[in-house]
Image (cartoon, rainbow, N blue to C red):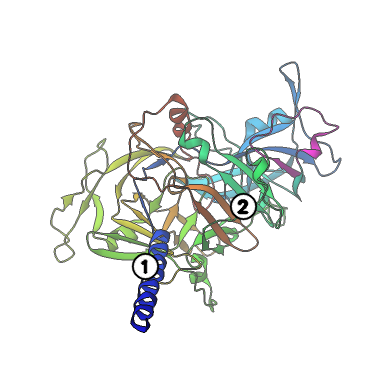
Amino acid sequence: MSTDKTLFKLIALAVVALAAALTNAATAVDIFGVQAGSLDQPRMNFVVESAATGLPYDYEGIFGGQSINIFAFLDTGASGIVISDASATELSMPRQLGVEFFDVGVGGFSLFEVSQPVVIRAAPYTEPNIDNKATYKTVYNQASGPYNVQVGPTNAVPDPLIGPLDVFGMPAMMGKVVVMDPTPLNTISDLMHTFIYDPGTPFNPNTTDTDPGIPTTSHQVKLSYGDFGRFTETTPPGATGPVINHNPFIGPNPTLVLEENPPVDDTPPVRIGFGGLETSGSFLLDTGAAASFISESLASSLNVRYRDTGPGDDPQLEIFDPNNPGALGTLIDNQFVLPIQGIGGLATVAGFFLDEMLLQTISGSADPNDPNNIRFMGAPVLVLDITVVDPITDETLTLDGVFGMNFLVASTALDFGELREGPFNWITFDEPNGILGMNIGPVVPEPGTYAMGLMGLAALAGLGWRKRRRAK
């Protein structure tokens, strides 16, 4: 009996150990098949009120009546709120006479007018247009302000595909929790649903489509915040400029390098690998970007660079020999190109697939094999320098990278040939606590090909290259 009991205990312990090992193994998240462009970016309905009167600005004569809402992108990569000149004109929003705001965007600087003080109110994407001025505040119940906002840009080349855009950035999210439901994209049944909540709002599983509250997520990534206000300028001196708030980064705050005695920032960076080499950097968490980027410097750390090409040719990326940098490199297989809309017009950039991209979670460790971390295998990134310049000191800062929506939601190849399901069924951005939350769906999708409908084509046409702010 004693031997039998001992054997039974050993078997039981082995079963428990095996179960624990399998449980731990199940938490290891290797995500395959992410494509270069996301099918959607978060959008919500907004109302703009006059801070002086407390009344909303409205469109006159739309469908025979009045409409007071703006359907806009909710963009963590935007430091301010940008209302297009077209929308501001339709709303009859007054500007401050003679006040201009200079910002940095892809291809040059952006020039904006500045509004008079406004209050911004948000309602979920799923809410219908609200035309009733007497009751709209019950639906548009997430308010921020009063503050001035950017109007324009006035010097931009209009995008021929998507036209003027309204972008509601970090000021609309300060002190709030953003909740995104990307699951409709996986079946091409709808666009993603986005909500803004006060912290502590409980999750309601019975109203997940219309008013979910804040869900619990399986994986959380710590964020830092960078302040890019120094890279902007308002004229004339002393004039009240538009509201500008910090932006979230996966990795240490990159603007600290410009400070004389910067504090220690131990926020874990994004780690990337290619061809047996590894490097890391701080990536802007950008819900307004449909694709993701790394800088030319970070690419060079992986022995990747642009090849010299002739006028009019598409850019090409090659692997070079660091011991013989003057020699012609080897072209990277399966690279892709994308036209980027900038202030000066369209510019084309190239991208390639990393071997892996690793996000260290709050519960994970620096060990790349820690089962609590998230690893994107075959991660697509464009190679592009996004550089900002201090208008007073001429100091420059180039971002290491941009972590875009293609890693968080359903994505597609840029030739519209494939659609890949997103791995998460909930995504949260907790601004007060600086946390990106991701909840793994029932099944982490393996590589697969789906027929893509017209909605995906329309969504990708607005790839988010309306980068008209610093760090863009």
Q: Check disc 2 and give the amino acid type.
A: Pro
User: Mark 1 = which residue?
Assistant: 18
Q: Label 1: few (<14), some or many (≥20) within 10 Å? A: few
Q: Front-most of 408 and 393? A: 408
Where residue 411 sits, quadrant-wise, is: top left
What is the residue that sits farthest to the front in this orientation? 1
Q: Check disc 1 and give the amino acid type.
A: Leu
Q: Magenta segment: does it hold 130? A: yes
Name the mark on residue 215.
2
Above or below residue 260? Residue 352 is above
Quadrant of the drawing holding the N terminus = bottom left
Q: Residue at x 83, y 37 (%)?
A: 55
Residue 249 horizontal side relative to residue 347, left or right: right
Q: Front-most of 124 and 277? A: 124
Q: Residue at x 54, y 63 (%)?
A: 223
What is the residue that sits farthest to the bottom in this orientation? 2
Name the mark on residue 278.
none
The residue stretch that appears in magenta: 119-140
Q: Residue at x 51, y 32 (%)?
A: 158
- Real-space CA distance between mark 2 and mark 1, rounded to the nearest whole angstrom: 31 Å
Q: Front-most of 263 and 180? A: 180
